Image (cartoon, grey):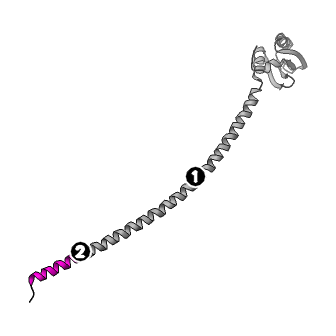
Amino acid sequence: MINLSDFFKNKDSLLVNTVFYFSCAILIVIIFGYLALEVKVYIQNQGIDEINKRMVGYSLYQQRIDENSIIDYKKKIDDFSLIIKNHKVSSNVFNFIEENTMSNVWFSNFDMSQSTYEIKLSGEAENIETLSDQIQTFENNKDNVKNINVLNSRVDANGKIRFLLSISLNPEIYSYIKK
């Protein structure tokens, strides 16, 4: 005969054994999953370290390129500073001409030789008296003008005087410092 208490004991034992083995299986799956994820994280960290090493190498290379570029710019600035330091201003010559040109005289061509401190001006005046007054105005400016020569003058078809002047200037007019 079958004892009912034995039946339930065996059934409980079977249920407990099933739950126990199922729990053990889940625990093994979790442990293998954890180990698999740890291996995957380790491999990813190795890849990240390799990328970081390459980035450091690249950043050092890029840094050297940037430093060389900065050194080149500094050299250019130093060279330009040297040029500016020795630069002579020609704008003073233009100011001189503007300040000393009469209202009825027009200059159409301007040729300046900074090495000989000479300018050649070609232009037009209303008449010979105006041209004479213009030359006298330049001659009266003894601070800047050494000598004036009329290289050419002629009367055009409209009765205007076309001329070419050569003016020798004092070298101080080319400097930054005005008297």
Decide if residue 24 is on the left or right side of residue 43: left
Given the image, on which type of amino acid does mark 1 rest? Val
Say if residue 103 shows up in the picture.
Answer: no
Identify the residue under disc 2: 19
55 inside magenta stretch = no
Q: Residue at x 48, y 64 (%)?
A: 43
* Quadrant in which the C terminus appears: top right
Counting every numbered tag in the picture gives 2
- Residue 44 placed where, x, y %? 48, 61
Say if residue 97 shows up in the picture.
Answer: yes
- Quote the CA–CA distance across marks 2 and 1: 54 Å
Given the image, on which type of amino acid does mark 2 rest? Val
- Residue 103 placed where, x, y %? 76, 14
Is 1 placed above or below 93 here?
A: below
Q: Main secondary structure of the magenta part?
A: helix
Q: Which range is magenta?
A: 1-17
Q: Quadrant of residue 28?
A: bottom left
Q: Which of these two is toward me, 67 or 92?
A: 67
Identify the residue under disc 1: 56
- Residue 51 placed where, x, y %? 54, 57
- Residue 119 placed where, x, y %? 84, 22
